[in-house]
Image (tube, rainbow, N blue to C red):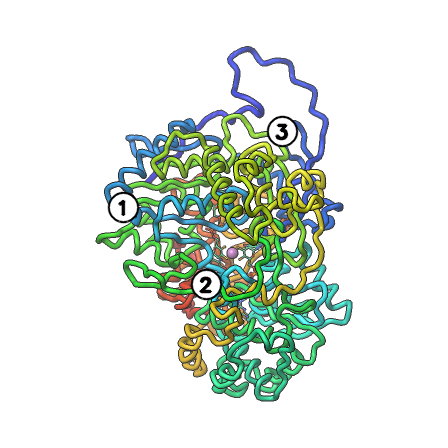
Amino acid sequence: MLAPLVCRQPAAPGGPVSATPPAPPAPPAPARTALRICPLCEATCGLTLTIEGTRVTGARGDRDDVFSRGFICPKGAAFGELDADPDRLTTPLVRGADGELHEAGWDEAFDAVAAGLRPLVERYGPQALGVVLGNPNVHTMAGALYPPVLLQTLRTRNLFTASTLDQMPKHVSSGLLFGDPLAIAVPDLDRTDHLLLLGANPLESNGSLCTAPDFPGRLKALRARGGTLVVVDPRRTRTARLADRHLAIRPGTDALLLAALAHVLLAEKLTAPGRLEEHTDKLAELAAALAPFTPEAAAGACDVPAEEIRTLARQLAAARTAAVYGRIGSCTVAHGTLANWLVDVLNVLTGNLDRPGGVLFPLPAAGPRPRPAGPGRGFALGRWHSRVSGHPEAKSELPAAALAEEIDTPGEGRIRALVAIAANPVLSAPDGHRLDAALAGLDFMVSVDPYLNETSRHAHVVLPPPPPAQSAHHDFAFNAFAIRNQVRYTRPAVPLADGLMDECEIHARLILAASGLHGADPRSVDDLVIATTLGKAVADPASPVHGRDPHALAALLTGENGPERRLDLMLRLGPYGDGFGTDPDGLTLDRLLAAPHGIDLGPLTPRLPGILRTTTGRIDLLPAPIAADLPRLRAALTPDPAAFLLVGRRHLRSNNSWLHNVPALTGGTNRCTLQIHPDDAAPLGITDGTRVRVTADGGSVEAPAELTDTLRPGVVSLPHGWGHDRPGTRLSVAAADPGANVNQLLDGTRMDPLSGTAVLNGFPVTLLPLPAAAPLTPA
Ligand SMILES: Nc1nc2c(c(=O)[nH]1)N[C@H]1C(S)=C(S)[C@@H](COP(=O)(O)OP(=O)(O)OC[C@H]3O[C@@H](n4cnc5c(=O)[nH]c(N)nc54)[C@H](O)[C@@H]3O)O[C@H]1N2
Ligand SMILES: Nc1nc2c(c(=O)[nH]1)N[C@H]1C(S)=C(S)[C@@H](COP(=O)(O)OP(=O)(O)OC[C@H]3O[C@@H](n4cnc5c(=O)[nH]c(N)nc54)[C@H](O)[C@@H]3O)O[C@H]1N2
Ligand code: SF4
Ligand SMILES: [Mo]
């Protein structure tokens, strides 16, 4: 167990504590404002921060932001409090000979990383090193720019990310259908006439794989313009309450519902793929494969009447334009890949893929230029397998649910050292107890994390990034999923505090320390990437810089530092870029800096067939791995009259595992309760507040009951990201109301086999009400 950290004086803002007598208090610095794109969810709202001295004292929506137009939610409004959280680490921590973590300088910390990692890699080879990348990597520039370089240098196949607790089924489905796992079509929210939304609750989450500031307002606008919103969710969520129709489906059965919808379209000749037909293979084979999934066959398992399924399909077909969109509730389930495949099958069959009002592929400014149509390299699954359970890789990743066994199972190839960046898998992945113990047994672990939490407490070195106000921001990830093409960049709103290091530099130094180049200039990492990218570009006949001198091009890049030069490079080579002078009106970093509220690049436009990278250059409507998984779906037609099924939920003022430490965002309805329908609670003698022991294959947790008729009977709900009751963390607010870790109910074996995504929704649990006096067992 870790001893608490040595207490210390908080660093004085702006500089180290001086030994001379304190000067008379300076007059308060006049307040100023600065812009910052919010990194707290996928909506990427523009914020206007109020800054006094170096402190953020307020945050409001930036009304001039080209995309978010002033929208803000309570999390964004709490930006200042989050930024100033006194529990944030302000120096690196290094584990000393006494086994405890001590504050250290940066040089000492990176020395310790090099000394910890290199001998293990040299002795046991690259596979002895595991890399875990958590969700906030998609919300930082560092997380976009450096992990690919880290992985390339390390050459380990032991990569685990939050994607296999989230959207990997979508990547796999897109990879198989379109040949590119990143080709994800997003619903054209502002223009569609009909939105069929499954397993998503944007009124709490603000949307996912569909970046849309003010998602709630856009749904209301859809209704107001006469459009139709259908929500499929076992809970009557705030989103469902906005809908024209809400289907309280049995958890885990969306793939059956979607297959039945496709079946109706095919059987009743309601398909109208239009121009997609010439780009699509295997339409006829699809009909045969879906033949068993009649509405009558699916109705029982889904608990949705067959007639309702038919009506839904007919309405979808009849809509002038329509978009089918599925998220977490369609991904983290047993048939996640099939459900996501069927989402796009429906979009193809109705002709809505790649058309305005349907679902469209964004064209982000810092992404690659569109390529001419033609065959691509295709997408393969299972190019290697995990060591212990033989799980196939998907998109070069192994299932996060298999991380613990890859560490704690002896044998050659065992993971002995871990690099964890912005990841808290002890809470976010199945079976935290096992992972907790596995991490404690590692030879070496380094965490890049601002908090000492359930996962980072095991690290030998913790490298803390600065608070968000001190970091620059551009959304490399989310612009690729945004419902409008636009580009924004914000420089740090306040200068980097003394003693802190920019997260980009942390990543660059980490790469050098892990790859045997410890001590080299961190700028060399950016220079290398720039040289490599330009080297490829000048050799590519399709590039606007084909044939030019890469050194001369590199000298043209602007920007104050490596990450800015890399952003400039990507923008200039990107679809709207100046091509280093080829298009003098094109985008550059300088042009972007001159537009502090961003540049609107217009609505999404059709991108087929150029976006297709399958080996045929066409959409493969029935890819072989999908066809091979259909018998498993067929078996699910026979409903399992299981006990209770558990589903998750999100709260607007929470964010996965790490926002429970901000007082403004805690309390009220944001609690870790077991929601249960009153009709289910009554026979068990459960009333509001009754403590209930919930048990499933991975173990038991306890939580107070909250009776609500928003759940369909037979379904209970616990949120994730709770369970802040482990010793050795520094999360004083979160620890006061720790909640229970729902993922302790899972042992990691329930998985969508094609994508390796953990089943986090729709698994069976049993419930036991506890007498009022029974002591709570720690979760
Ligand atoms: N049961 C259940 N489990 C789930 C889910 C569910 O719906 N149900 N959802 C899953 C999903 S969708 C996801 S994405 C995962 C998320 O789970 P994780 O990937 O573990 O991500 P988070 O919990 O968001 O945060 C991880 C860490 O990032 C750190 N962090 C915050 N900001 C920064 C930063 O700027 N830089 C760095 N380096 N670190 C930072 C935080 O302190 C925290 O320790 O959880 C999954 N787990
Ligand atoms: N406030 C807040 N915002 C967040 C996050 C957060 O933790 N808090 N996390 C961020 C992250 S990492 C992500 S990935 C996104 C996720 O964004 P969303 O996908 O919108 O996530 P949820 O709000 O969890 O909504 C999932 C819904 O699926 C339902 N569901 C569960 N099982 C099933 C099922 O079998 N079928 C169907 N049809 N529905 C089912 C649940 O009841 C729930 O309402 O949110 C992001 N935004
Ligand atoms: S909706 Fe998301 S991006 Fe916008 S303010 Fe809230 S947390 Fe930030
Ligand atoms: Mo996520």
* Residue contact at pointers 2 and 1, CB within 8 angstroms: no
Q: Quadrant of residue 517?
A: top left
Q: Which amino acid lies under the numbered mark 2 shown in the image of this protein?
A: Arg
* Foreground tag (2 vs 3): 2
Q: Residue at x 46, y 63 (%)?
A: 377
Q: Furthest residue to the left? A: 411
Tag 1: amino acid = Gly
- Where is 320 relative to 510, above or below? below
Q: Secondary structure at mark 3?
A: loop
Report whether the residue tagged 3 is closer than 8 Å to ligand 1: no
Horizontal relation, residue 640 to residue 225: left or right: left
Q: Looking at numbered disc 3 in the image, what kind of residue is underneath it?
A: Thr
The residue carrying mark 2 is 377
Which residue carries the number 3 mark?
54
Q: Residues within 10 Å of mark 2 (few under 14, many from 20)?
A: few
Q: Which residue is most to the top?
A: 20
The quadrant in which residue 701 appears is: bottom left
156 lies above or below 329 = above
Q: Position of residue 685 (x, y in %)?
A: 48, 69
Q: Residue at 38% x, 54% y: name it.
A: 432
Q: CA distance from mark 2 to mark 3?
A: 50 Å
Ranked by sequence position, the earlier of labels 3 and 1 is: 3
- Residue under numbered circle 1: 125
From where the camera sits, is residue 710 visible?
Answer: no
Sequence-earlier tag: 2 or 3: 3
Q: Check the image and name the residue furthest to the front.
A: 547
Give the CA distance from mark 3 to mark 1: 45 Å
**Total numbered labels placed on residues in the image:** 3
Q: Is residue 624 left or right of residue 196?
A: left
How much space separates mark 2 and mark 1, taking CA atoms? 30 Å
